[in-house]
Image (spheres, coloured by chain):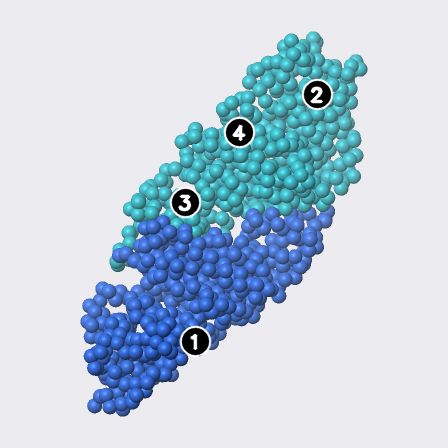
Chain colours: A cyan, B blue
């Protein structure tokens, strides 16, 4: 995946881990029609003549007024050889585009992942199902408000909903422009758009007030917005293109998570899987083809670089991997884009905490053994910012809270549904961190459970990949609807067990080391445990 | 029916002759919902919560984005006691309006008859089916172009389609304003609109190019436009209100005629009926529940006052009835609104021609017996225009052409379908003339066939009444679709028999007097025939 200008673009995610078996049955279809021209012996009206051809193959097809106005000229210009694009909105077919001649070899859709930070747009060839091209950028809302809560505040109390909506739509439109130029596709040739987004991002995209999402009893305006005409929100695609957003389960389990579950296939599996998406919020789903339970909770912004002193987003110059020599405490690292280091992103932080533990720099309570306040990872001279890149005790405390919250949530959910960890056959990690978090380090610090490594599956940008599936397969889209309808929400905040586990899990990797046998073995091997 | 200012308004038509049996099943429904408010134990999203209540009763209901934005505030303001208006578009239900509280006692629709000359709007109470109020005015397009052909020319070759569309929409909007003020109804409470109009009027209303309607092979843009959002054409009703226009059969058999057939009920009858709608064009339908055949042809503008020297539309001051004393040739007359005579309208012209024949002023060829060039009906002093109101030989020739065209069309159609006049059980007359043309005089001059008088049924403004039926009954609306689909079009212009009959029918009442036994008897009684 490429961002054309590294300065501007965030680093985005690639890769499809799970092979999905589905037949191509995209939301929109293109079909070539060779229509008998009107004559004195057949003086049917133009629109009805066209519609009759479509009805033969699809049943009733609605023709919007905009196209009625255009049909006579298009059909005559093309001597009644035209290509119709029609879309199924779940109830009936609608004509979306009519082009002169045979254009059935050009059929495009967009799958969009709208993250709080990053927007990724995939231009999809609806004939092959392939991603032709993709592009990403910061969500334009970032400059208005960095985090979700700020944006909700701005939308609800500062009358900035229209501005926020415009910001994300502009971001998407710029990406569409870039993609369509690169691929020589006219935006009017894009007939369908699918969106994976968290509940707040979806509200802001649709111009819906998100104010009640973050206030008890946490009520979104809509969970399932169905099909909407893309031009209603100003997307620069065909004016009649259909927009489908993944349904949410509630304020804290959004369409992005449903898309992830869809991509994982856990909803079809007879075995039990765990699905974890960690960002500022963490969402966890457990279940199989018979049942699905979700919980969500604040993980804190530590992994997104929000509160860690030298933390940053996964951008060029961010330290993304590191290791520490147990003898010399020398730090080896790798930055994104191999640029001079300017900070440390989520995956680097996880590595750092794990290495601190495995080298004895910190103890299992997460305290520096020698009582120091900070550890210099990279001296100023090596950096691109002329400042030491350090990890402080406060940073470590923040990271411990994040791992504790996720860990406690997983355990509470497992207990709540009466499942042991050993009955989990697959562990899916999704979202930005799901792609890049180092598995070993994540287990070492207790963020991920200590499972056999082959059970752990990185889903990549499953929100975008889910959007692609929904674009290409009505069956997959219906599966997503079903997933959303089937998920039972498990309220962590109303659960005493969660809080006691949260408090109790503030050891590395865990209060009870027996839950982490492979980490225990490493610590013993290094002489840090006996 | 009232036009509030007689100077401005045309005289419009009233009366329902045919009793239609149908159960109220309007295009839109209103339903009161007492919704369980959100809580920590039930934190469903607002839109989904509302939709679920509707689904219980109607199955899937689409919620447009515009309403999603409004739902949270309306529901909370009303403490979750709201009234939903939903509409069925033939395939699925859509939410059209949401009001706080219980508003189910207020449910309104519009039935509109768009004539080339006059627009009539009926405000209908969807709870009772009754017409609350009606208003009419000239079609605002009249000032741009008097007749259909001029308007088609303006739309297609002078880029005046937007102006013509705006003109008729403005006319309708003014009438809506008038009606809603009088009835204390807010236009946003109007959730459905049905339209009966000829094919050209429908094209101009929808902003569709009518250019091919009048050129071989006579192809409209659309015959069946289905459901359209009323705000797409700028109607001042609820922005989500549904607009349904009666389907046309072709360029010359429009939705107004289909509405008329629906009102007549002839499509359900085992006996054969004839349906005649005479304006500038005449449309004739023959058939029963098993078959329906239509023809159409130019009747000429004579009856609409277009070419007759002192002719005028049916407005105040128009002579609408007259009789002539066979001894003294003294003329008795009645004007519309009992005002001083200023001209003579269609019904007056028919009476005049019949009286001329029955008093021997003209012979059966339609020539003045004494060779004069004109006959003074009303001397200047009695008129409101200080000019004699006269009928000239040229006027009579024009009227003879009209009656000849209609008569020849009816006979050609009867012959074409292999029916004798004696097998016609009912003769329906529709449209402006259907309401007012004097039956006896119409038969005397041979415009109507010489049928037993009880077989002749005046339908009144059947286009508007049909619109009311479609508004109130989905069953009736589907019947209309079926009528349009069932009608076979019979091309008069391709028929030699029509031309020979047209030429041959230029006697009063007919070349063959045996077809008009009651007229023959009158002529004999008056000593004009032996």
Query: Where does label 1 land, which residue?
Result: B339
- Label 1 crowd (10 A; few <14 / some 14-19 / many >=20): some
Chain under disc 3: A
Residue A221 lies left or right of residue B152; in this view the side is right
Question: Element under label 4?
Answer: strand
Closer mark to the observer between disc 4 and disc 1: 1
Give the residue number, with chain letter if any, for mark 3.
A97
Do the dots labelled 4 and 3 sit on one chain? yes
Q: Secondary structure at mark 3?
A: strand
**Sequence order check, earlier mark of 4 and 2:** 4
Q: Secondary structure at mark 2?
A: loop
Residue underneath mark 4: A136
Q: Position of residue A369 (x, y in %)?
A: 78, 15
Estimate the x, y position of residue A432 in percent, counting from the top left. 60, 29
Mark 2 sits on what residue? Answer: A309
| Pointers 3 and 1 within a single chain | no
How many residues crowd around disc 2 within 10 Å: few (fewer than 14), some, or many (20 or more)? some
Q: Residue at x 71, y 42 (%)?
A: A215
Q: Are marks 2 and 1 on the same chain?
A: no
Q: Specify the quadrant of the image occupied by residue A336.
A: top right
- Measure how far apart labels 2 and 1 are at the Cα level: 93 Å
Front position in the image: A59 or B229: B229
**Depth-wise, is mark 3 or mark 1 nearer the camera?**
1
């Amino acid at each position: 995946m490429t961002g054309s200008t590294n300065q501007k673009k965030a680093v985005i995610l690639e890769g499809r881990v799970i092979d999905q078996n589905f037949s191509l049955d995209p939301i929109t279809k293109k079909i070539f029609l060779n229509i008998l021209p009107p004559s004195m012996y057949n003086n049917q009206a133009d629109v009805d003549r066209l519609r009759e051809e479509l009805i033969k193959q699809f049943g009733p097809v609605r023709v919007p007024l905009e196209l009625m106005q255009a049909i006579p000229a298009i059909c005559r210009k093309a001597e009644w050889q035209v290509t119709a694009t029609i879309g199924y909105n779940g109830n009936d077919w609608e004509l979306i585009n009519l082009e002169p001649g045979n254009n059935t070899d050009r059929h495009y859709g967009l799958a969009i992942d709208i993250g709080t930070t990053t927007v990724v747009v995939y231009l999809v060839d609806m004939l092959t199902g392939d991603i032709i091209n993709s592009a990403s950028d910061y969500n334009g809302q970032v400059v208005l408000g960095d985090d979700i809560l700020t944006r909700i505040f701005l939308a609800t109390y500062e009358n900035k909903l229209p501005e926020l909506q415009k910001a994300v739509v502009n971001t998407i439109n710029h990406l569409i422009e870039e993609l369509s130029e690169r691929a020589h596709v006219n935006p009017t040739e894009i007939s369908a758009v699918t969106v994976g987004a968290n509940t707040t991002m979806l509200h802001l995209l649709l111009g819906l007030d998100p104010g009640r999402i973050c206030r008890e009893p946490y009520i979104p305006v809509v969970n399932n917005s169905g099909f909407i005409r893309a031009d209603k929100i100003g997307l620069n695609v065909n004016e009649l293109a259909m927009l489908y957003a993944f349904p949410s389960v509630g304020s804290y389990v959004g369409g992005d998570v449903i898309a992830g579950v869809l991509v994982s296939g856990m909803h079809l599996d007879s075995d039990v899987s765990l699905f974890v998406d960690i960002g500022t919020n963490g969402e966890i789903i457990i279940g199989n083809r018979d049942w699905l339970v979700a919980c969500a909770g604040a993980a804190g912004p530590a992994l997104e670089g929000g509160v860690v002193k030298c933390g940053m987003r996964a951008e060029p110059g961010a330290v993304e991997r590191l290791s520490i020599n147990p003898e010399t405490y020398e730090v080896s690292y790798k930055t994104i884009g191999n640029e001079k280091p300017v900070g440390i992103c989520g995956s680097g932080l996880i590595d750092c905490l794990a290495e601190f533990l495995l080298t004895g720099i910190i103890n299992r309570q997460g305290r520096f053994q020698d009582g120091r306040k900070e550890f210099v990872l990279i001296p100023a001279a090596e950096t691109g910012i002329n400042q030491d890149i350090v990890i402080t005790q406060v940073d470590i405390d923040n990271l411990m809270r994040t791992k504790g919250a996720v860990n406690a949530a997983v355990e509470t959910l497992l207990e709540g549904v009466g499942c042991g960890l050993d009955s989990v056959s697959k562990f899916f990690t999704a979202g930005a961190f799901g792609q890049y978090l180092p598995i070993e380090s994540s287990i070492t610090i207790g963020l991920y459970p200590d499972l056999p490594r082959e059970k752990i599956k990185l889903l990549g940008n499953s929100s975008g990949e889910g959007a692609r599936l929904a674009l290409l397969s009505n069956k997959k889209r219906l599966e997503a609807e079903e997933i959303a309808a089937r998920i039972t929400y498990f309220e962590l905040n109303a659960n005493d067990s969660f809080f006691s586990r949260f408090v109790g899990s503030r050891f590395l990797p865990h209060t009870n080391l027996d839950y982490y046998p492979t980490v225990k073995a490493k610590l013993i091997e290094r002489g840090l445990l006996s």
